[in-house]
Structures are given as structure tokens and as C-alpha cells.
Amino acid sequence: MTDLSMRIAAVAAPVRQQVAEALRGAITSGRFAPGQRLVEKDLCELTGVSRASVREALRQLETEGLIETLPTLSDQTWSLLRLDGDMYESTLVALEHLYPRLSPGGYVIVDDYGAVQGCRQAVEDYRAGNGVTDELIEVDWTGVFWKKTG
């Protein structure tokens, strides 16, 4: 039978899938460094697609374990913030996004402060850059905490 009217035409992959493949390739090829912060707005400009497509692609890459994301929590507050980011970038990003929503009187606990130089540097850079002068208290040889006063 040679009737072609029933043939399924090849359709390009959904935009989300194309973006995910492009990002996956950029990550695995080293275009993006391990731990590098990927900003949605920048990825939209880089790929020329909508923010929704970039978000969907990032969710897909997160489920594959290729990236880690920090959800937007701008409408929530909390009294305890415990960070185990290990590296400079992940610790700094967590502080930038989460610390402003910590209630006054709330506590920040940071694992690996004493064990990982990048973690320590991120905490010090964030505190210095944001005027955080609350006393930093050692928990043990690696962990620290402070109480947010203002």
C-alpha cells in the first residue's frame, strides 16, 4: 500500500526538550562550570526562548540530577535556616535567596564552615556585603550559627 495520507510527519522536538538538550550539552561540554549559577533571564537571552520554556527545561535537568535549583520562596518566612551547600556558589546563592526571608530572632546554621574554604568565604562575603554583624558561634570544628537580630 502506497497511500501516504496516513503517514505521520516528523515533528521537531518540543521547545522545552530542545532547550534541555542545549543546556545539557553546554553543561557536559564545560561551557558552564560546575556550580556556576544559571540565571533564567540570561538563559532566555542565550537560547532565544521564553522563560516558561527555560523553567521547564531546568526542571527536567533537575529531575535527571544534572543541576540543582533553589525554588522561589519569596512569599514565605521561617525561623530556622540550615545550609549545607559545601561550595562557595551554592552557599552564597542560598544566603542571597533565603536569608532575607529569615525572621528577626531566627537562626542560621551553616555546616562545613570550618571544613570547606569556599563555604567559609561565601558566608563571610555575604555577611560583609549585607552588613550582618551578628555574633558567629562555633558549633563544632566545622559548623557555625548566628541569630538574626534585625
Image (spheres, rainbow, N blue to C red):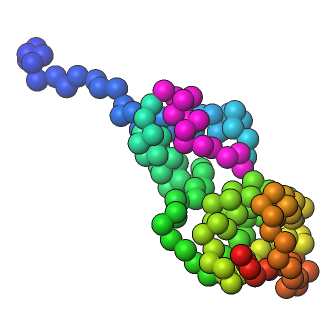
Which residue sits at x=60%, y=51%?
A: 67
Q: In which quarter of the image is residue 22?
A: top right
- Does residue 101 show up? yes
Is 145 situated left or right of 49 in this image? right
Residue at the (68%, 84%) spot, across then down:
105
User: Which one is in front, 40 or 96?
Assistant: 96
The answer to which quarter of the image holds residue 33 is top right
Residue range in magenta is 35-48
Residue 142 or residue 64, whichever sits in front:
142
Left or right of 119? Residue 93 is left
Quadrant of the image occupied by residue 109: bottom right
Q: In the shown orientation, is residue 53 left or right of residue 149? A: left
Residue 28 lies, in percent from the top left, at 65, 38
Identify the image quadrant of the C terminus: bottom right
Is residue 96 part of the magenta span, yes or no? Answer: no
Residue 62: % across, % down = 53, 53
Q: In which quarter of the image is the N terminus?
A: top left
Q: Front-most of 105 and 46?
A: 105
As drawn, 16 above or below 123: above
Q: Is residue 48 left or right of residue 4?
A: right
Rendered residue at 48%/35% (across/down): 19
Identify the residue at image location x=69%, y=38%.
32
Q: Looking at this view, is 16 or 71 the one in front?
A: 71
